[in-house]
Amino acid sequence: MTINEKLSKIQTEFKSKKSRFNSFGKYNFRSAEDILEATKPFLKELNVTVTVNEELLTMKPGSCDQPVLKTTASICDGKDSISATAIVGVDTEQKGMQMPQRYGAASSYGKKYALGNLFLIDDTQDSDATNNHGKNVTKQKLNKESLAKAKEYISKGGSLSAIKAKYEVSAKHEEILTL
């Protein structure tokens, strides 16, 4: 079996429930640890290893001074490998967190999204979470402040679909958010 076939098997058979709950945002989610735990049976069966590596990217002088972590998740069968990456910013101004916690939070997001990219994990919300139960829901318009917050959210690994669920996102806004 080729590395592509092995990865395809994991991608199609992978199951990991969103068993953790964010009480602030009132939603369920899965962590990088949950994803890794769900892949363990496949590792032995397919004789592959999964690794996650992080790199702190240096910013060019005069550019954004926010540190950025590049996280790469790889699957290897001893001779071939396939990798996927995620890029997340480190919010060095996050209130209520010590600096190691700020880097740890960015690291967790990076690992989760790099693994999600590698294993093609659909991280969209389930229908119960997005169902408006017959109520008309008016999306907010993006203003300068909410656009900046949305960009920061995405830089930390948040999804564009979550932004679109809450805000009216024009093609121009989408371009700004995905740069």
Image (spheres, rainbow, N blue to C red):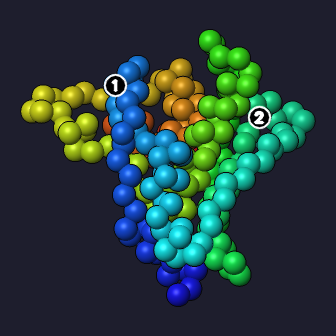
Q: Earlier in the sequence, mark 1 or mark 2?
A: 1
Pick whichever, 63 or 104, lies toward us. 104
Q: Is residue 164 visible?
A: no
Which numbered tag is attached to residue 26? Answer: 1
Pick whichever, 167 or 143, lies toward us. 167
On screen, 74 above or below 144? below
| View extreme (top): residue | 96
What amino acid does circle 1 point to?
A: Lys
Q: For mark 1, give the secondary structure.
A: loop
Q: Quadrant of residue 15?
A: bottom left
What is the C-alpha distance between the residues marked 1 and 2?
Answer: 29 Å
Callouts 1 and 2 close, C-beta under 8 Å: no
Q: Quadrant of residue 139?
A: top left
Q: Residue at x 81, y 35 (%)?
A: 63
Q: Is residue 65 left or right of residue 169?
A: right
Position in image of residue 170 (x %, y %): 42, 41
On screen, 139 above or below 58? above
Q: Nearer the viewer, mark 1 or mark 2?
A: 1
Pick whichever, 54 or 87, lies toward us. 54
Number of numbered markers: 2
Q: For mark 2, give the secondary structure.
A: loop
What amino acid does circle 2 point to?
A: Pro
Q: Residue at x 40, y 27 (%)?
A: 22
Q: Is residue 82 left or right of residue 133?
A: right
Q: Residue at x 25, y 27 (%)?
A: 138
Q: Is residue 105 visible?
A: yes
Position in image of residue 67 (x %, y %): 77, 34
Which numbered tag is attached to residue 67? Answer: 2
| View extreme (right): residue | 61
Pick whichever, 82 or 170, lies toward us. 82
